[in-house]
Every structure is written in structure tokens, then in C-alpha cells.
Amino acid sequence: MRFPLFWCIFRAPVMYKSKMIQMLRNLSPKELTRFGEYLASPFFNKDEQLPVFFHYLKKYAPEFESRNLEKERMLEKGIPGLALSEKKLGYLMSDIVEHLEGFIRYNQHMADDLEGYVHLLSKYNDWEADKFFEQTLRDARAYLDAEPYRNAPHFYKAFLLQSELNTFFDRQKKRAYDVSLQEAANYLDLFYLSTKLRYSCELINRQKLVASDYSLRLLKEITDHLREHAYDDYPSISIYFQVLMTFLEGDNEVHFEKLKHQLEEHTEKFPPAEARDMYAYAQNFTIRKINAGDKKYLREYFNISVQALEKGLLMVDGDLSPWTYKNLVVAALRVGEYDWAEQFIKQYRSKLNEKFRANAYNYNMGALLFYKGNLGEALRLINQVEFTDIFYALDTRTMQIKIYYQLDEWDPMQSAIEAFKVYLRRNKTLSENVKLLYVNFLKFIDKLSRLTKRDKTKLEDLRSRIEETRQIADIGWLQAKVEEKLNHR
């Protein structure tokens, strides 16, 4: 017996929160058209009412938020070609969802031509149609060779192909040596090692970010094997192995140097999303080093980020995220690359999503002017930043306070400190660890602002307390300002 899946939705005035509408809203115009064709095919759908219902819904794409999608309105006005009741509408919605899921599964299956070839080879093996098998095998090999990437999914496809070829030779009942069995085993090893290393890297990374205790089975056996056997011809193994070793042997800089070289040479062998993750691992390693006090990795972070940018890996669907934009600017400023930062800020402004563009540009141009000592103009720009993004808000408030400090504007600085404290106290989305960084910054900048160059003992005590606390936003800037007062003649 079928039950309408969305009867509870009818209590609301509109249906646009239903699963059906949410799914339709996520389809591209091309996918919506193809889904209509899917419903119109008797092979997939034999209910003639569903294409009629879908045609009505499609008129309100892509938002699907028209009043004509209200349940009462549809029942009152009707849909041409359909006899509607509340129960019937529930069934139609349920059936559309079922077919949408079938459409997605079908598209995913058809998108991978290699697996289609493997299914065809398997059928020709069953039929013992050797001529057809060999023709299809040539096409499948050509398709696989033409693939642009050499990552774990590629090795899995090669394994499937060699497995089917081994079945073909096994069916011949010949006792001669055939390489397909060995090749199938080899590709399976490459797939396993690539996948195992990638997952191991992510498991260790997660352990550093959240309280978790993941099990890393066979890690010692795999690392021992990789130390004894070179896989330089397989970047999907060699890159993840070096990433893994930056986690396990972070003090050995050889691993990071090898990782940098391999990223520069081989990332075109991976889909952009995977290559982007590889660079993120390298960036995160440099961040761990910077946080541990090794300032030479500031330059390493900047160089890696620029390389990823030049390879087009930091863009997603043609957009640069405002956070990546800011991270690159901050990295450039911290290593003194002011000209590069200014050119980047201006050149990539148009690559930012329009809703973030003004805020991101004003903040980052303000940061550049702050580093160059143009404090008044920097303050003018960052005062235009609207606090719509929490991390831009945190950094903007921090920079305001630093500018007031350097301009000796004590009253505005105290007002900004108090406003920042209220903001942190009321904010419910920030973690306590992040809040602590900024609370400590405010506490120490407030103390520093009340000391003069003659308060040597208190300044030395403040320096020691900052060093002991460590969890302070902009700790480097704060320490530099303490030293300025201590060394002032």
C-alpha cells in the first residue's frame, strides 16, 4: 500500500519546503529538461499523469516559490489534465520524488562510460561472443587511456577492466601465462594504497580538529611497505604518503620538501577538488609550523598558496571565496609582498561573489594600508565593512583597535574594546576556543595601553604573561608593541 509522503506539508500554506520542491530547485535547467524527457519515457514511467504534473511545476522554475504552488490554490484552480484531491496530490508528489531519485541514479550510472564498457564486456563473456568482446575491449582501453586523471578511481576502473579480461582468458581454458590477472592485482593494489593513504590523512587531520579516536589499521604495515618500495610513478600514492609523513614525522623537513615538489609537478593528474585538498594539506602543515613559532614557514605558506592560485585550484565555479581572498592577502602582507598584495586585491576583486565583494575589498585594502602605515585611510576603509561575516567581523574589530592604539586614540580604542567584548559575549556561534583568542587580545591590549615606556617592570611582566598565555589573536603584533615600549629610549 502506498502512502503520501508529504501529508504533513499540507498544513503549511506552500509546498516549497517539501522534499520534492527542494530536489527540483537543485536541478539545473538542462537537468530539468532531461527529467521531463525521463518522465515522458514509458521505459521509466508508465503513469501518464506525472508528466502533466511536472510540466505544471516546471513553469515556476528555478525558484519554485510561486503562490500557484500553494496546496489550496492548486486544489481550487486545478491543473489542466489532472483530477486533483488532497490525497491524489500527495501521491503525485511522492511519485515525483521517487522518479527524481531514479533519474539521479540513472544519470550517475550512465555518466561513467568505463563501467558501461565493463558491463558490456561481461555480457559478451556470458554470451561467449569473442569478436564483440575484443572490439569493445579496444574501445574501453582507448577510453581509459584518454582519461585525464590518474587517481584512485582511475586505478579502480583499470582493475575492473583487467578483471573482465582475465575472465575472458580464463574462459578460453588455455594454460598459457596471461598478464591480465597480474595487472588486475596490481591495479587493485594501486587503488587500495591510494585510497587508504587518502583516508588515513583525513582521519589524522580530523583527529587534530575534533575530539575523536579513529582507528588507523595497517598504517605501520603500509608505511613500512612504502619506505621499501618506490611509487614515484604513481603520484596518487607518493603525494598522500608525503602528506601522511608530514603528520607522523612533522619535524623531518624532507617530507615537506618532497611534497612541495610533487604538488608542483603532478597536480594536473587529479580533479581540481582533489588537487585543492592536497594543497590544503600542505598549507595546514605550514600553519602548524607557524603556530609552533617557526616563522620561516610564513614564506612557505605564501608560496604554496600562490602556486595553488596560479594553477586555478583556489577558484570554485569561477568564484574566489572571501576567506581565501583574505588568507592570501594576509600571507602576502606578513612576508612583505605589498605590491603583490595590492595587485591581487584589485585583480581578483571581480572574482568574489557579489554579496561579499564590497566587504572583502574594503577590509583587505584596509589591511594593506595598515601594513604600509597609512592608518587614517585604512581606518576609513575598514569602517565601511559590514559585519555580515563573523570572521571578517572579528578581524575588522581587531584591526580597528590596533589602528586606534597606533594613533594614540585612547577613547575610541576603549569604546571599541568594550563593544568587542559585548559582541563576543552575545555571539552564540563562535566556539569558546575562538572567543578565548580575542578575549585575551582585548585583555592584553587594554593593559598595554595603560603602561608607559617608564613602566619597565610591568612591561616585562606583561611580556612574560603574553608568552605564557600564547592563545591570543594577533599575538605577534602584540609582542612587537610590548618590545617597542620596552626598547624606547
Image (spheres, rainbow, N blue to C red):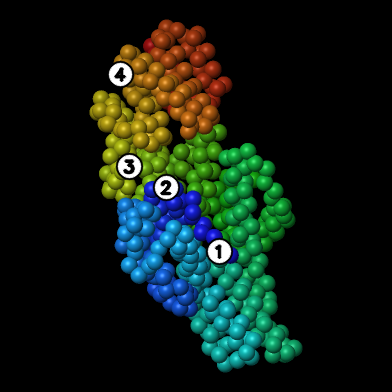
Q: Nearer the viewer, mark 4 or mark 3?
A: 3
The amino acid sitting under disc 4 is Leu
- Are the residues tagged 1 and 3 within 8 Å (C-beta)? no
For label 2, the SS is loop
Q: Can you give x and y, in whole percent of width and height, for residue 131 in the image?
A: 57, 92
| Residue on which disc 1 sits | 2
Direction from residue 58 to residue 39 in the image, left or right = right
Q: CA distance from mark 3 to mark 2?
A: 33 Å
Q: Quadrant of the N terminus?
A: bottom right
Direction from residue 327 to residue 289 in the image, left or right = right
Q: Nearer the viewer, residue 341 or 350?
A: 350
Q: CA distance from mark 1 to mark 3?
A: 47 Å
For label 4, the SS is loop
Q: CA distance from mark 4 to mark 3?
A: 29 Å
Q: CA distance from mark 4 to mark 1?
A: 72 Å
| Residue on which disc 3 sits | 356
